[in-house]
Image (cartoon, rainbow, N blue to C red):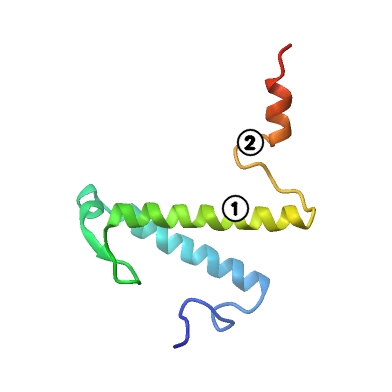
């Protein structure tokens, strides 16, 4: 079964990929902005067939994205490529600032 949502037919170069990403982001934001508290409490079915509250499903998506970001940071670290700090400071900067004066 072919996967939907991926493939060169959606975007086949850098600029087209960024345009696609921006378009999908805006569509997603429109959907998220339309959700009410009642909508977040409703049940939905995941692609795997599990039934979850919409709010929990959305939180799971964020957690999954964090997981992938962590994977990217690990691979970049293995390759010796520096990564931007997640929360404004690097580990080294936090340690340096934590030293007693």
- Horizontal and vertical percent position of residue 34: 29, 55
Q: Quadrant for residue 8, please give it.
A: bottom right
Q: Horizontal and vertical percent for residue 49?
A: 29, 71
Q: Is residue 66 above or below residue 89?
A: below
Q: Secondary structure at mark 1?
A: helix
Q: Nearer the viewer, mark 1 or mark 2?
A: 1
Q: Is residue 63 placed above or below 91 in the rendered structure?
A: below
**Quick one: label 2, few (<14), some, or many (20+) residues within 10 Å?**
few
Which residue is drawn at the image coordinates 48% and 76% (left, top)? 5
Q: What secondary structure is found at the residue carrying circle 2?
A: loop
**Cα distance between the residues tagged 1 and 2:** 16 Å
| The quarter of the displayed image where residue 71 is located | bottom right
23 lies above or below 76: below
* Residue indicated by mark 1: 70
Quarter of the C terminus within the rendering: top right
As drawn, 49 above or below 57? below
Percent coordinates x, y for residue 2 in the rendering: 47, 86
Closest to the observer, 92 or 41: 92
Circle 2 residue = 88
**What label sits on residue 32 in the rendered view?**
none
Which residue is the extreme one toward the right?
Answer: 80
Using residue 35 as the reference point, say whether residue 58 is left or right of it.
right
Dots 1 and 2: beta carbons under 8 Å?
no
Question: What residue lies at 71% left-to-right and 48% top-to-bottom?
Answer: 83
How far across and down, in percent of the image, does residue 90 sit? 69, 36
Q: Nearer the viewer, residue 31 or 83?
A: 83
């Amino acid at each position: 079964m072919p996967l939907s949502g991926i493939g060169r037919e959606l975007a086949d170069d850098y600029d087209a990929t960024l345009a696609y990403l921006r378009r999908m982001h805006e569509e997603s934001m429109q959907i998220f902005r339309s959700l009410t508290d009642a909508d977040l409490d409703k049940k939905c079915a995941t692609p795997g067939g599990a039934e979850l509250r919409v709010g929990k499903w959305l939180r799971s998506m964020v957690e999954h994205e964090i997981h992938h970001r962590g994977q990217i940071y690990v691979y970049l670290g293995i390759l010796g490529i520096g990564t931007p700090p997640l929360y404004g400071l690097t580990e080294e900067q936090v340690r340096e600032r934590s030293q007693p004066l």
